[in-house]
């Protein structure tokens, strides 16, 4: 039997100052009249969108909220407050739930973080990427390293002690020493959490169409990953997911819910949601139209829905493993059964193959990726494609 898991709320704020050449997210430079996005209109659209989706989550408690983008920190605190007030009137918010706002250091202003904190935001995620100013320019970022450090200081002064720094490695022209220097600069800011991930040239991006000539090769990227992992571990940051490291009890609750195959409402232009419908014994994905103009015109109606899809039982093992096997903790076989509605026998054959190749280890109810399995994660997950 499917058991509804914890529920999160994802809110997509699609505008940014400048589209980065490596970015494949649903983000849009605003070129409309007035020079700033229609913040008030967009918040009204978000709440109408939420109203339309509410029947999928009646009576359930929200355990985390995440504002992603785009650049959510473009939105003034008053707009964030208006949304949270409206959302909490419609949904039951768990006491002390984690509320994260993605932040571009180039949009930080004195006093702004105090106001975000007053709205209920209690976690920030800074898109730093690197502390090398020349590389930041090549990445198309609107901030420099001094602005990144200043933004973190402003957040600390405003009372934020729970914040993440996003860092990338294997960047154009980057050496191992440069990657190490980024970790050193990040650690000096004492973040609660670090996301450290490799640059990939995603389809439909500027970098995919015109690849930089000096991106480090795979062996160099692996050396950077291993060295930076060790530096983070030595500083007390435990790796709990492929690209996520945290101090004790500072893991990102929202992302953990994704990786544990939890449920989430997704509202905003291009947002995706996943809901377990116990009465129907179904798992449904729903996504919204991507372009902000079309979304604003249709939010709160069926025309805003880009698509609805039930995850067929045969595909659920792959969907589950795509998330759960990113975690160092692995997963419980009993949790697999509850979250997919399938017996553990449904994955017996691929699980046996993974064990034979020393990719996965089974300890009672728990399935853990081995060090070799973490290195060949995509190959492990592919075993479960046929259930």
Image: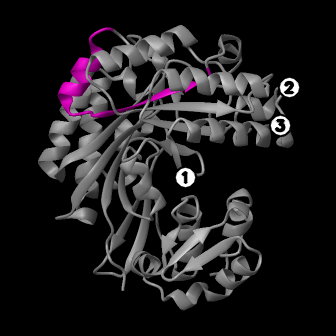
Question: 24 above or below 251?
Answer: above
Give the CA separation, mark 1 to mark 2.
Answer: 28 Å
Q: As rendered, which of 233 and 296 lies closer to the eye?
A: 233
Residue 148 versus residue 222 in the image, above or below: above
Q: Residues within 10 Å of mark 2 (few under 14, many from 20)?
A: few
Question: Where residue 71 appears, x then y in whole percent?
Answer: 45, 27
Q: Is residue 80 magenta?
A: no
Q: Position of residue 110 (x, y in %)?
A: 31, 8
Which range is magenta? 110-130
Q: Is residue 144 visible?
A: no
- Which residue is denoted by mark 1 in the rendering? 241
Q: Bin the neighbour count of mark 3 within 10 Å (Cα to Cα): few under 14, some 14-19, many 20 and up.
A: some
Q: For residue 340, what is the image quadrant?
A: bottom left
Task: Specify whether 44 is left or right of 37.
Answer: left
Q: Nearer the viewer, mark 1 or mark 2?
A: 1
Q: How many marks?
A: 3
Q: Residue furthest left?
A: 89
Question: Circle 3 — which element?
Answer: helix
Residue 115 forms part of the magenta stretch: yes
Which secondary structure, mark 1?
strand
Q: Earlier in the sequence, mark 1 or mark 2?
A: 2
At a point 53% along the width and 69% down the height, the residue shown is 320
Residue 220, numbered circle: 3
Q: Nearer the viewer, mark 2 or mark 3?
A: 3
Q: Give the color scheme: rainbow, by chain, secondary structure or one colour.
A: one colour
Which of the marked residues, 1 or 3, is nearer the chain's N terminus?
3
Mark 2 highlights which residue? 214
341 shown above or below 52: below
Looking at the rendered structure, the secondary structure element under dot 2 is: loop
| Near-viewer residue (160 or 206) | 160
């Amino acid at each position: 039997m499917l058991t509804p898991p914890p529920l999160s709320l994802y809110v997509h704020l699609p505008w940014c100052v400048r589209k980065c050449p490596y970015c494949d997210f649903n983000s849009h430079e605003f070129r409309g009249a007035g020079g700033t996005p229609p913040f008030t209109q967009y918040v009204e659209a978000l709440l109408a969108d939420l109203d339309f989706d509410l029947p999928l989550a009646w009576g359930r408690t929200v355990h985390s909220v995440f504002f992603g983008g785009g650049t959510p920190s473009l939105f003034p605190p008053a707009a964030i407050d208006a949304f949270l007030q409206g959302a909490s009137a419609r949904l039951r918010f768990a006491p002390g739930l984690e509320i994260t706002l993605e932040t571009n250091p180039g949009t930080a202003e004195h006093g702004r973080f105090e106001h975000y904190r007053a709205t209920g935001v209690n976690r920030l995620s800074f898109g730093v990427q690197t502390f090398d100013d020349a590389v930041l320019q090549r990445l198309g970022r609107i901030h420099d390293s001094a602005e990144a450090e200043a933004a973190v200081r402003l957040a600390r002064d405003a009372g934020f002690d729970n914040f993440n720094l996003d860092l990338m490695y294997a960047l154009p022209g980057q050496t191992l020493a440069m990657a190490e220097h980024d970790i050193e600069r990040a650690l000096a800011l004492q973040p609660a959490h670090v996301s450290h991930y490799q640059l990939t040239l995603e389809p439909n991006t500027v970098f995919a169409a015109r690849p930089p000539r000096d991106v480090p090769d795979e062996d160099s990227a692996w050396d950077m990953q291993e060295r930076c992992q060790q530096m983070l571990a030595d500083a007390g940051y435990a790796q709990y997911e492929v690209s996520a490291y945290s101090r004790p009890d500072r893991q990102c609750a929202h992302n953990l819910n994704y990786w544990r195959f939890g449920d989430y409402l997704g509202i905003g232009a291009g947002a995706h949601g996943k809901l377990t419908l116990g009465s129907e014994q179904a798992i449904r994905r729903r996504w919204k139209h991507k372009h902000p103009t079309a979304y604003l015109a249709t939010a709160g109606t069926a025309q805003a829905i880009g698509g609805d899809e039930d995850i067929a039982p045969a595909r659920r093992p792959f969907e589950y493993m795509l998330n759960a096997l990113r975690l160092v903790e692995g997963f419980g076989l009993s949790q697999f059964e509850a979250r997919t509605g399938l017996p553990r026998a449904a994955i017996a054959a691929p699980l046996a193959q993974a064990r034979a190749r020393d990719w996965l280890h089974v300890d009672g109810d728990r399935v853990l990726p081995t060090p070799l399995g973490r290195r060949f994660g995509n190959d492990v997950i592919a075993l479960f494609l046929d259930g």
